[in-house]
Amino acid sequence: MSVVRKPHVSEAVLDSSAILAILLRERVSARVHDVLDGAVMSAVNFAEVLTKIGEANDTFLQEAEALFALFDRIEPFTETHARRAAGLRRRTKEFGLSLGDRACLALALELGAEVYTADQAWAQVEVGCVVHLIREPRDSVQ
């Protein structure tokens, strides 16, 4: 994957929880599937997904690699991202957001992008970017 930026009208940043939800075949909104092609992910979240699937089996690894092949790029975690993620701690601490969560949000803020996550706690956080929760409600019709 390349870190060379392609021009996009709008980019989608994916949290590791979104990829894991897809791999675990949870009910997710069609919207997340629509943004996979050309999506962006922080290297921190990429490491989280690889760590989780490394604990599972080779089928998950193959499926994850197929998903990652759709991505535009994996963004390095830079000093700027680190400073922004650290700055988000105060506003997100009470909601339990991890460093990985804040790395994802820092990238979305830098890119002016919307972020996609399966983590419900993000709906309560106001950090300056649009957050899409990707899990479908349990009572939705398939």
Image: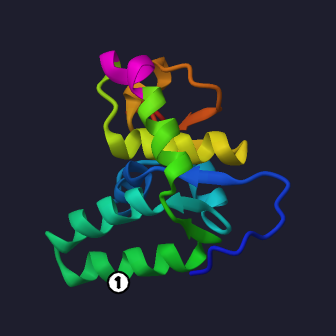
Residue reaching furthest to the left: 55
Q: Is residue 126 left or right of residue 4?
A: left
Q: Can residue 135 be seen in this view?
A: no
Q: How many labels does the image show?
A: 1
Camera-side residue of 78 and 141: 78
**The residue stretch that appears in magenta:** 89-94
Q: Is residue 14 magenta?
A: no
Camera-side residue of 92 and 66: 92
Q: What residue type is labelled 1?
A: Gln
Residue 51 x/y as whole percent: 23, 66
Q: Can residue 5 be seen in this view?
A: yes
Q: Residue at x 59, y 52 (%)?
A: 13
Q: In this view, does 113 lie above or below 34?
A: above
Which residue is identified by label 1?
A: 62
Q: Quadrant of residue 113?
A: top right
Q: Which residue is drawn at 33% across and 21% down?
A: 93
Q: Residue at x 84, y 65 (%)?
A: 7
Camera-side residue of 38 and 128: 128
Give the secondary structure at mark 1: helix
Residue 70 x/y as whole percent: 59, 75
Where's the N terminus, which quadrant? bottom right
Q: In which quarter of the image is residue 39?
A: bottom right
Residue 135 x/y as whole percent: 44, 40
Q: Is residue 17 above or below residue 40?
A: above
Q: In this view, does 59 lie to the left or right of 101?
A: left
- Dominant secondary structure (helix, strand or loop) of the stretch shown in magenta: helix
Q: Is residue 79 above or below residue 39?
A: above
Colour convention of the picture: rainbow
